[in-house]
Image: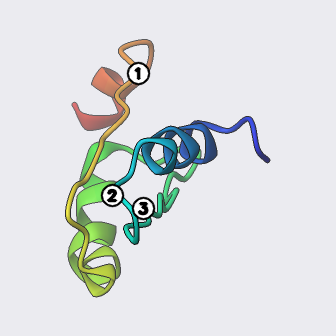
Amino acid sequence: LEQTFGKVLEAALNANAPAGLRYEAVNAGVSGWGTDQQLLWLRSEGAKYQPDLGLLAFFPGNDFQNVS
């Protein structure tokens, strides 16, 4: 778990964070979802987290096909 993208990102952000500031990375990735499904999730559930930043990992090997 500590070597996942989200945890590595979170650790790197927190290592350089100003005193009293803590970053939290939420991994909302779901295998098999396309960007259309990710957007629907962000609108209905993800917005509840009030994120300051969102990152989208896009894999050209199959994501182009998923959204076509």
**Residue 68, image quadrant:** top left
**Res. 3 mark:** none
Q: Earlier in the sequence, mark 3 or mark 1?
A: 3
Instruction: Using the numbered discs, state the Cα–Cα distance from disc 1 to disc 2 in whole angstroms.
Output: 15 Å
Number of residues whose C-alpha sits closer than 10 Å to that of mark 1, classed few (under 14), some (14–19) or many (20 or more)? few
Relative image position of residue 14 (x, y in whole percent) = 48, 51
- Which mark lies nearer to you, 3 or 2? 3
Task: Tell me the kind of residue under disc 1.
Answer: Phe
Q: Which residue is mark 2?
A: 37
Rendered view: 36 above or below 42: above
| Contact, mark 3 vs mark 1 (Cβ under 8 Å) | no
Q: Residue at x 36, y 27 (%)?
A: 63
Q: Which residue is mark 3?
A: 23
User: Which structural element holds mark 3?
Assistant: loop
Residue 56's image quarter? Answer: top left
Mark nearer the viewer, 1 or 2: 1
Q: Point out residue 45 in the picture as x, y percentages from the top left corner.
A: 34, 81
| Residue under label 1 | 59
